[in-house]
Amino acid sequence: MHRSFAGLKTHLDLRFLKARRNCRLLWCTMCGSGICLIACATGAAIAGLVIATHAMAALLAAAPACAAPRVSCCSTLAWMKRLQQHMDRLDAAARGADVLNNDMDTIERLVDRLHATVKGDKILVRLRLERGRGQHHTIEEVVRQLRKNHPSLLCQLADLEEHICLYFAAVNRARLFLVHHLNAQSDPNAELPL
């Protein structure tokens, strides 16, 4: 699971970068179109001043050319808005995958610590029992040492339980986000949870 979350984060980051490139390309295209429109309008105005007799014809010919980009500009702005929403969702998904990956790292470290504690107690019991075979006080020492280590073991178990619960809560939040995202694709007016 740990490797799959790391791979998911990498995949989402790449998708986010691709969407950002598309957004920049669209923005540059829009700016370039605006500059071309201004240049065309300026050229038409200069041509209208130079050719005074055909000024009315030049203005009537330039009017439809100026009105046409507005329609495409509105659809371009709507497309940019959808692209920005897509980028926001990709970014949120990448952050969610990163949170799950960090939670998995924490759980892995806690399990390793707990395993090391239990392994240390097993080695302690074995060494004490091998040294004092049949001696009553050796068994008492082992029991005393295990009782001494018991609160630490319980604390580690409580930490592990808490982090596992937090991990499952994060997984449930990610699942809820995914369900709302799928519903938002079918109903664009739906709100996504925070």
Image: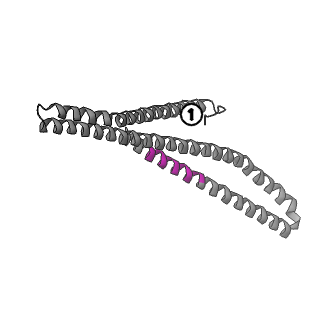
Q: Amino acid at mark 1?
A: His
Which span is picked out in magenta? 8-23
Q: Residue at x 55, y 42 (%)?
A: 92
- 7 or 167, which is in the foreground? 167
Query: Dividing the image into 4 quarters, which one contains the N terminus?
Result: top left
- 142 or 6, which is in the foreground? 142
| Direction front: furthest residue | 137
| Direction bottom: furthest residue | 50
Q: Classify residue 61 as left or right of residue 116.
A: right
Q: Residue at x 52, y 48 (%)?
A: 16
Q: Is residue 15 magenta?
A: yes
Q: Quadrant of residue 38?
A: bottom right
Colour approach in the figure: one colour
Q: Is residue 45 magenta?
A: no
> Which percent across, then down, holds residue 160?
40, 35
Element assignment for label 1: helix
- 126 or 83, which is in the foreground? 126
> Which percent across, then down, holds residue 89?
56, 41
> Which percent across, then down, holds residue 121?
25, 37
| Direction left: furthest residue | 133
Q: Classify residue 158 as left or right of residue 193.
A: left
Within-10-Å neighbours for mark 1: few <14, some 14–19, many 20+:
some
- 110 or 18, which is in the foreground? 110
Query: Where 48 sits versus 63, above or below?
Result: below
Query: Which residue is disc 1 drawn over?
Result: 181
Q: Quadrant of residue 150?
A: top left
> Which percent across, then down, holds residue 116?
28, 41
Dominant secondary structure of the residues highlighted in magenta in the image? helix
Query: Dividing the image into 4 quarters, which one contains the C terminus?
Result: top right
Q: Residue at x 22, y 32 (%)?
A: 140
Q: Classify residue 172 as left or right of residue 27.
A: left
